[in-house]
């Protein structure tokens, strides 16, 4: 992009250097007044200033492109992180609702058992720890119910035995 301007820049520097050497450094007597040399060098060095401006413009363009790329990359990263956060929140909410509903079912079942209803059976199709807890709860209520039936049966038998003992004692 800057090839022609770089060549002009190099040629200008050489021209100014040669002019300086011929008219200021090498002569035995300084024939060229300083204002004339300054006017010559200033006119020639405009090429250098134009080259510098072109370099700054090129570098600014490159940096602007890199900045835009970095902004796009960061925006993409933020969007992916946002999406992941939404997925995590969705999964957390689902887990929370599932656990909350299961605990509420257990609380209702425990209240029914404490009120004397031993026929409580919880329905839960989970294959995790909550499912195992449900099975253990249902097994516990079933065993308590069997024990109560056995106690009722045994109390009836004890009552019959007591009546026979009473009848023998009276007779």
Image (cartoon, grey):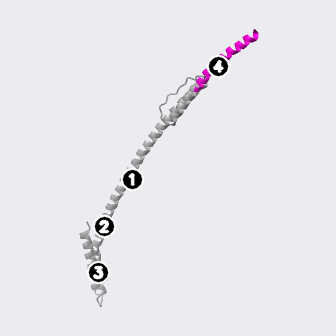
**Labelled pair 3, 1 in contact (Cβ < 8 Å):** no
How many angstroms separate mark 3 from mark 4 (CA)?
A: 125 Å
Residue at the location (72% across, 10% down)? 167
The reply to whether residue 67 is visible in this rendering is yes
Which one is in front in this view, the residue at disc 4 or the one at disc 2?
4
The residue that disc 3 covers is 17
Q: Considering only order in the chain, which callout, 2 or 3, is on the residue closer to the N terminus?
A: 3
Q: Mark 3 or mark 1: which comes first in sequence?
A: 3
Quadrant of the rendered image containing residue 136 = top right
Mark 4 and mark 1 residues within 8 Å of each other at the beta carbon = no
Disc nearest the viewer among 2 and 1: 1
Left or right: 111 with respect to 42?
Answer: right
Q: Main secondary structure of the magenta part?
A: helix
Please report contact status of discs 3 and 4: CB closer than 8 Å, yes or no. no
The extreme left residue here reads: 4
Please state if 30 lies on the left or on the right of 111 as rendered.
Answer: left
Residue under pointer 4: 154
Number of residues whose C-alpha sits closer than 10 Å to that of mark 2, classed few (under 14), some (14–19) or many (20 or more): some
Vertical placement of 49 versus 106: above or below? below
Location of the C terminus by quadrant is top right
Mark 4 or 1: in front is: 4
Total marks shown come to: 4
Front label number (3 vs 1): 1
Q: Which residues are magenta?
A: 143-171
Residue at image coords 34%, 61%: 63
């Amino acid at each position: 992009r800057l090839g022609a301007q770089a060549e002009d820049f190099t040629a200008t520097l050489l021209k100014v250097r040669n002019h300086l050497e011929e008219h200021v450094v090498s002569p035995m007597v300084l024939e060229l007044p300083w204002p004339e040399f300054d006017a010559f060098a200033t006119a020639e060095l405009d090429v250098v200033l134009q080259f510098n401006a072109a370099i700054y413009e090129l570098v600014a363009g490159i940096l602007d492109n890199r900045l835009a790329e970095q902004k796009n990359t960061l925006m993409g990263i933020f969007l992916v992180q946002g999406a992941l956060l939404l997925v995590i929140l969705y999964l957390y909410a689902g887990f929370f609702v599932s656990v909350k509903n299961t605990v509420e079912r257990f609380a209702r079942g425990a209240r029914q058992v404490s009120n004397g209803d031993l026929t409580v059976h919880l329905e839960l199709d989970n294959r995790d720890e909550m499912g195992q807890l449900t099975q253990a709860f249902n097994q516990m209520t079933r065993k308590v119910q069997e024990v109560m039936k056995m106690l009722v049966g045994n109390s009836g038998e004890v009552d019959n035995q007591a009546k026979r003992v009473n009848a023998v004692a009276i007779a």
